[in-house]
Image: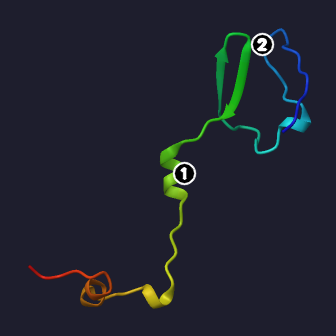
Amino acid sequence: MGVGKAKIDSKWRIVLPANVREGFQPGDEVLVIRQGQVITIRKAIDPLRLFNEVKLFIPDDKAYSDVSEVKHYYGARKD
């Protein structure tokens, strides 16, 4: 966690001090939340993009190409 001072320029811009920039990249979208005199800047996260970036891996011994193998592994039954 970092703490730093910044000034608001004539165009209402703020430059984040170097010691608080960790995890941010130029072009990132941020959420600006104001609660009274406290302003919080948080990285905006797109849940759909995050979901699409998730990679699921399965061990080779659990990868089945035949449904008949899978149903026995998971205890499925035929009704």
Residue 72, above or below 39: below
Residue 18, above or below 74: above
Q: Which residue is mark 2?
A: 12
Residue 73, above or below 3: below
Q: Nearer the viewer, residue 23 or 75?
A: 75
| Snapshot quadrant of residue 23 | top right
Count of marks overlaid on the render: 2
Q: Nearer the viewer, mark 1 or mark 2?
A: 1
Which residue: 66% across, 16% down?
Answer: 34
Secondary structure type for disc 1: helix
Task: Say if mark 1 contacts mark 2, CB within 8 Å.
Answer: no
Residue 17, above or below 22: above
For this view, does 10 lie left or right of residue 40? right
Q: Amino acid at mark 2?
A: Trp
Q: Residue furthest front?
A: 75
Residue 65 percent coordinates (x, y): 34, 87
Calculate the distance from the C-alpha at mark 1 to the C-alpha at mark 2. Answer: 31 Å
**Quadrant (top left/top right/bottom left/bottom right) for the N terminus:** top right
Residue 58 percent coordinates (x, y): 49, 79
Which residue: 37% across, 87% down?
Answer: 64
For this view, does 67 lie left or right of residue 7? left
Q: Which residue is mark 1?
A: 50
Which residue: 83% across, 8% down?
Answer: 10
**Quadrant (top left/top right/bottom left/bottom right) for the C terminus:** bottom left
Give the colour scheme shown.
rainbow
Q: Amino acid at mark 1?
A: Leu
Secondary structure type for disc 2: loop
Residue 45 percent coordinates (x, y): 59, 41
Tell me the crowding category of disc 2: few under 14, some 14 to 19, or many 20 or more residues within 10 angstroms, Cα based. Answer: few
**Disc sitting over residue 23 in the figure:** none
